[in-house]
Amino acid sequence: MPEIYRLTGLRKSFANKNERIQILNGIDLSIEEKEFVCIMGNSGCGKSTLIKIMEGILPGDEGSILFDGATPGSQVSKEMQRKFGIVFQSDNLLEWLSVYKNVELPLRVFGKKNKNENRKKVMDALTLVGLQDYSDCLPRELSGGMRQRTSIARALVSDPAMLMLDQPFGALDAITRKALNAELLRIWHTTQKTCVMITNNENEALLLGGRVLVMSNPPAKIIHEINVPLTYEERISGIALNPAYLKLRAELASIVRSLGNTLQS
């Protein structure tokens, strides 16, 4: 597959009283179209900072970004931000708007005014995540998992080039998280969207990712890359007993221990 995104020599620091703290110290990565990449690292290593720079919410200090054939320097432009669908750690739903209107919001922000076209896009997105019968509900009427599925629909409604997910299931209970992992895998398989996901969960990373990138402690670099050559069918049918998965799980667990073992199994 052709490359859709490349970071080269990305650095980022933040001011702390009278000094600057280096968070990212030369991040290099490339992502191909239709790929699902998971990024892991200890808490505070700069994972969320990295994905915010990748999607244009924060600027980098140094380095270059190549995205969808354009090179915007060390920061993604406002116009290019429209090519990302973003799912945050919190669902960030507007409590006074219905599920339908929450999902429609990016279309309205981007100036899409054709009501019939917008309705088709919104209902297609809701159908994809299994919420087509809840379009008139308010967020308070949804479970935690349904709220996060709504946020995924909202991220997909504008047909983005890339879907960016920053620990989207971290606040959910283990059973709901496992169910949504399977749901996200199905959505990726259906849409073939390029996905980048931040996670602290080893099982989640190996279930979803075609590659798992591991960041060092700060000042962070990417220090390990694990290829996960499991088919979609292998991932959805008894992956926990798959010998290839178990081998990768042991490899990733060893890497996690070397970082201080603050990630989740």
Image: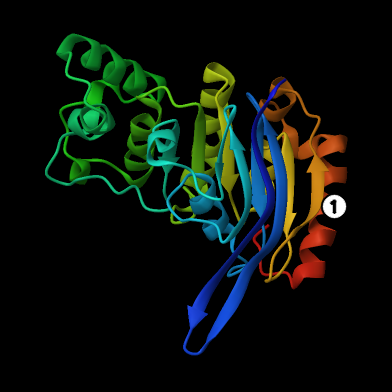
Residue 93 falls in image quadrant: top left
Q: How is the image coloured?
A: rainbow
Residue 257's place in the image compared with 94, above or below, is below
Residue 78: x, y in percent? 38, 41
Question: How many marks are shown on the rendered structure?
Answer: 1
| Residue that carries the numbered disc 1 in the rendered image | 250
Residue in front for this viewpoint, 73 or 23: 73
Residue 212: x, y in percent? 73, 45
Give the quarter of the figure containing the C terminus: bottom right
Q: Is residue 168 left or right of 185 when viewed as pictured?
A: left
Decide if residue 146 is in sight here. yes
Residue in front for this viewpoint, 83 or 251: 83
Residue in front for this viewpoint, 127 or 211: 211
Residue 100: x, y in percent? 21, 28
Q: Residue at x 56, y 50 (%)?
A: 74
Q: Is residue 121 left or right of 101 when viewed as pictured?
A: right
Q: Residue at x 83, y 44 (%)?
A: 248
**How dense is the environment of label 1, judged by Cα within 10 Å: few (below 14), some, or many (20 and up)?**
few
Give the quarter of the figure containing the N terminus: top right
Q: Residue furthest bottom?
A: 18
Decide if residue 42 is in sight here. no
Residue 197's place in the image compared with 195, above or below, is below
Q: Secondary structure at mark 1?
A: helix
Residue 174: x, y in percent? 52, 51
